[in-house]
Image (cartoon, grey):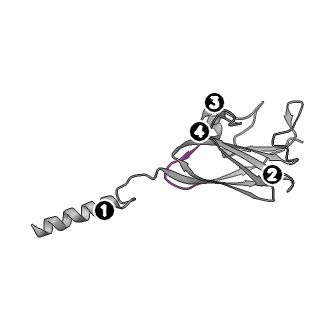
């Protein structure tokens, strides 16, 4: 019977070590690289939400992840550990630093972008077009800034 006790102890020890049991981690880091900024003026404002109805502005999502990073040639948005799920990211290049996307009539005067480089047609893309999964591996995204003027 001593051999059996050793096998049971080994199973208990293996179950106590995360990753050996096959359980997925509760969160993963989300990092997005933003390219195509036309200047290093102002800041890049980003919001990431899991709520389709809160996309793209995240205004009514208290759980949204928000970042403000100084503009540069390339900007790295590090949202840190994020719970598993489906998310979408919206970004703006707030060149004048007023904390919002400036518009001329209804057209954006400053840069904007979305996860998956979701296409823009007569308004922002849908949550589904910009959505990506956070599911056990580090989420690395690339977002290209777009400008209309």
Q: Mark 4 — residue? A: 50
Examine the structure image and report whether residue 134 is included in the region drawn in magenta.
Answer: yes
**Magenta segment boundaries in residue numbering:** 131-140
Task: Name the secondary structure under disc 4.
Answer: loop
The x and y percentages for residue 101 are 82, 39
Quick one: quadrant of the N terminus?
Answer: bottom left
**Marked residue nearer the N-terminal end (1 or 3):** 1
Relative vertical location of residue 42 with respect to residue 149 in this rendering, above or below: below
The x and y percentages for residue 96 are 88, 47
Task: Name the secondary structure under disc 1.
Answer: helix
Q: Mark 1 — residue? A: 14
Q: Residue furthest front?
A: 62
Judge the density around disc 1: few (<14), some (14-19), many (≥20) Cα neighbours within 10 Å. Answer: few
Relative vertical location of residue 63 with respect to residue 19 in this rendering, above or below: above
Q: Are marks 3 and 4 in contact (CB under 8 Å)?
A: no
Examine the structure image and report whether residue 112 is included in the region drawn in magenta.
Answer: no
Q: Residue at x 25, y 61 (%)?
A: 11
Relative vertical location of residue 102 with respect to residue 143 in this rendering, above or below: above
The image quarter containing residue 126 is top right
Q: Residue at x 63, y 35 (%)?
A: 61
Residue 41 circle label = none
Q: Mark 3 — residue? A: 53
Q: Mark 2 — residue? A: 43
Q: In this view of the protein, which residue sits in the foreground, 134 or 13? A: 13
**Marked residue nearer the N-terminal end (3 or 2):** 2
Q: CA distance from mark 3 to mark 4?
A: 9 Å
**Marked residue nearer the N-terminal end (2 or 4):** 2
């Amino acid at each position: 019977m001593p051999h059996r006790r050793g096998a049971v102890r080994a199973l208990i020890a293996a179950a106590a070590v995360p990753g050996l049991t096959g359980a997925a981690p509760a969160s993963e880091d989300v990092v997005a690289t933003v390219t195509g900024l036309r200047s290093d003026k102002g800041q890049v404002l980003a919001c990431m939400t899991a709520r389709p109805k809160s996309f793209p502005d995240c205004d009514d999502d208290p759980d949204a992840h928000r970042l403000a990073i100084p503009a540069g040639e390339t900007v790295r948005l590090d949202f840190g550990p994020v719970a598993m799920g489906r998310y979408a990211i919206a970004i703006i290049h707030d060149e004048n630093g007023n904390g919002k996307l400036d518009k001329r009539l209804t057209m954006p005067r400053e840069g904007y972008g979305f996860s998956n480089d979701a296409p823009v047609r007569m308004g922002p893309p849908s949550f589904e077009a910009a959505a990506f999964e956070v599911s056990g591996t580090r989420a690395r995204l690339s977002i290209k800034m777009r400008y209309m003027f």
